[in-house]
Image (tube, grey):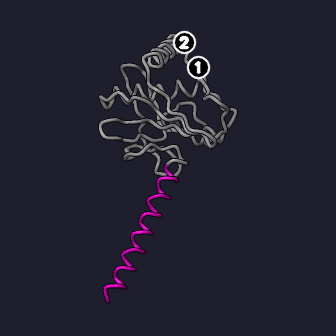
Amino acid sequence: MNPSTLTVLTLIIFVLALALFLIAGQTRKATGMPGGRVIYADTSRWNSLDKPLTDPELGLTGKPDYLVEQGEQVIPVEVKSSQIGQTPYDSHILQLGAYCVLVERLFGKRPPYGILHYPNRTFAIDFTTELEDAVFAIVWEMQEHGRSKAPDRSHEAPERCARCGFRSACDQSLRI
């Protein structure tokens, strides 16, 4: 192979590599995923994990869609399927806050933020002491209600029950 052909091939390979790198960055940005290594995934696109993140001392359990490791940090990512307006729902922020609490307790690393991704917007939600306190307040309130009587699960949507990540451990799951 002559030197000019080798130079042209090298240039073509370089341009293709650069194009693929840019496309990958745009795809990552469109999905709302932060840069880093995915260390946990619970979505239909991946094999579902059998065990959720659990803190028995706090009585808190959850299955974030992704956990992304960025250096020393672990960032929870929750992907929602519905469109959103200017701000995320409070319940979604509290859910993400609960995942941040679980990450800190299980990995020993406090996430500085978590990601809420909707089809039309992505939000980086700071894991502040105020959000952490709100999560603890809700957990304690739920525990107080739970002591009086265990609530029945809602089974108005059998398809939702069939896809529930806790179905195998639920004593009220529908056997569809």
Counting from the top left corner in percent of width and height, residue 60 is at 44, 24
In which quadrant will I find the C terminus? top right
Amino acid on which the number 1 mark rests in the picture: Pro
Q: Report the disc number at residue 89.
A: none
Q: Pointer 2: what residue?
A: 145
In the image, what residue occupies the spot 39% across and 74% down? Answer: 11
Residue 138: x and y, percent? 51, 16
Residue 22 in magenta stretch? yes
Does 160 sit above or below residue 141?
below
Of residues 59 and 147, the one nearer the viewer is 59
Q: Residue at x 49, y 38 (%)?
A: 168
Asked if disc 1 and disc 2 are in contact, CB closer than 8 Å, the reply is yes
Identify the amino acid type marked 2: His
Q: Is residue 52 above or below residue 60?
A: below
Label 2, secondary structure: give it.
helix
* Lower position in the chain sequence, tag 1 or tag 2: 2
Q: Residue at x 45, y 41 (%)?
A: 66
For the magenta stretch, what is the residue range? 2-28
The residue at the far front in this view is: 4
Residue at the disc numbered 1: 151
Residue 44 placement, left or right of 74: right
Image position, residue 87 (x, y; %):
62, 28
- Going by the image, does 96 lie left or right of 109? right
Classify residue 17 by image quadrant. bottom left
